[in-house]
Image (spheres, rainbow, N blue to C red):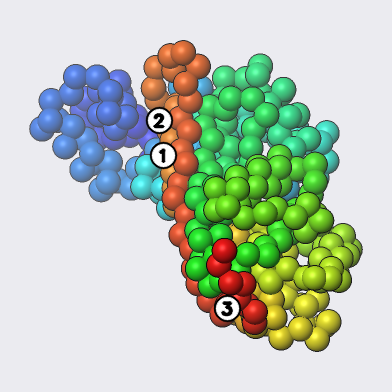
């Protein structure tokens, strides 16, 4: 049977209220008395009842983590791992949840209220799911941290990588190798993430003095099993003249392009350089190993927890400011990039 605070109070001959103050860090308890209470609690095997505490405070020591049901991707697992590390340091735990349909969002939020989670992290939601969540959460006293997912309105917390700098590093690397004919392979055309990365690509190319060939901006799908990805890759490879390098907005798209290029008989990276974005675990195991951008996903998870806790504990944010964090990116050069066979003569 679990040891209660009343049993500790009886053991020491003191009031239950004094024990409660000492174990919960509240009230004006003398250090010597607090130490004695804590030592007795440990000796008797006392464990704090978080559910009962949540009933009193209105908040539990839990944070929610919501993602799409079928998403067990590498980067989501790394973000979640980093979030768990940070939560453990604060003696919190994370309740991982997923949704199948947009109609599930309301039910997820209702469960969060039932469990009295202190805050919610969301990642890899569709744009429609983000908008549904934003609408539903307006009525709740629950801060939300968006991880990578671009919110449609100012969010309590938004943690994401510096994609512009990541693409800037890629273009600098490719141009240093001699590439000028550079294409872009993106995800869903209607995705806010896709729009953001395409905008960054255009700006970086413009700043580098490079021409953006509109025909070489192809779009597939973030859904890895979608036939749109193979079709987009084959379309890009069929152009004559063909680009000498392709920047992909995600590692999976880059791996699909590498496969399709090899099926078409191209020798990589000599006849086509390919870059990714994310640094998934398999990026280093592809053939050739993929040059890509490290988005520091474990750090992203840690920062999301820290920022969310700051949001929970702080006073109201003035002037609509939010706890937003832009994390640095790092280029990882591997074997999928090399100088083009014919390096153009500088003008």
Residue density around tag 2, few if under 14, some if 14–19, many if 20 or more, within 10 Å? few
**x then y, percent, for residue 133:** 70, 30
Q: Is residue 115 above or below residue 263?
A: above
Residue contact between numbered discs 1 and 3, judged by CB atoms under 8 Å: no
Quadrant in which residue 24 is drawn: top left
Residue 338's label in the rendered image is 3
Q: Is residue 183 above or below residue 46?
A: below
Callout in the foreground (1, 3): 3
| Precedes in sequence: disc 3 or disc 2 | 2
Residue contact between numbered discs 1 and 2, judged by CB atoms under 8 Å: yes
Q: Secondary structure at mark 2?
A: helix
**x then y, percent, for residue 15:** 26, 22
**x then y, percent, for residue 251:** 65, 64
Q: Is residue 91 above or below residue 337?
A: above
Q: Secondary structure at mark 3?
A: loop
Query: Residue at 71% of width from left, 42% of height from top?
Result: 195
Looking at the rendering, in which quadrant would you find the N terminus? top left
Query: Residue at 56% of width from left, 60% of height from top?
Result: 171
Q: Which residue is mark 2?
A: 310
Regarding residue 252, the answer to whether it shows in the image is no
Residue 186's label in the rendered image is none
Q: Which residue is mark 1?
A: 306
Report the Cα–Cα distance between label 3 and label 2.
45 Å
């Amino acid at each position: 049977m679990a040891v209660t605070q009343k049993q500790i109070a009886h053991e020491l001959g003191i009031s239950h209220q004094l024990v409660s103050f000492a174990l919960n860090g509240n009230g004006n308890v003398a250090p010597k008395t607090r130490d004695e209470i804590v030592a007795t609690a440990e000796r008797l095997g006392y464990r704090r009842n978080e559910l009962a505490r949540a009933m009193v405070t209105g908040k539990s020591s839990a944070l929610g983590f919501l993602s799409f049901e079928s998403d067990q991707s590498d980067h989501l697992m790394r973000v979640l791992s980093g979030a768990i590390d940070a939560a453990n340091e604060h003696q919190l735990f994370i309740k991982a949840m997923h949704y199948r349909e947009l109609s599930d969002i309301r039910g997820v939020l209702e469960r969060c209220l039932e469990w009295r989670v202190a805050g919610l992290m969301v990642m890899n939601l569709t744009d429609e799911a983000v908008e549904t969540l934003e609408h539903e959460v307006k009525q709740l006293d629950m801060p939300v941290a968006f991880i990578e997912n671009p919110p449609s309105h100012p969010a309590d917390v938004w943690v994401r990588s510096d994609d512009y700098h990541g693409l800037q590093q890629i273009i600098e690397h490719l141009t240093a190798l001699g590439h000028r004919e550079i294409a872009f392979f993106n995800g869903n055309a209607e995705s806010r993430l896709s729009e953001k990365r395409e905008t960054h690509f255009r700006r970086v190319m413009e700043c580098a003095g490079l021409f953006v060939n509109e025909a070489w901006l192809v779009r597939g799908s973030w859904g890895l099993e979608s036939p749109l990805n193979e079709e987009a890759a084959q379309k890009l490879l069929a152009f004559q003249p063909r680009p000498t390098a392709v920047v992909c907005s995600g590692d999976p798209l880059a791996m699909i392009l590498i496969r399709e290029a090899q099926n078409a008989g191209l020798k990589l990276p000599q006849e086509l350089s390919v870059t990714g974005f994310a640094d998934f675990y398999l990026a280093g195991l592809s053939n050739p190993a993929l040059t890509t951008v490290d988005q520091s996903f474990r750090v992203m998870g840690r920062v999301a927890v820290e920022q969310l806790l700051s949001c929970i504990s702080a006073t109201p944010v003035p002037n609509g400011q939010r706890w937003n964090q832009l994390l640095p990116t790092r280029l990882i050069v591997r074997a999928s990039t090399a100088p083009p066979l014919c390096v153009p003569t500088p003008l």
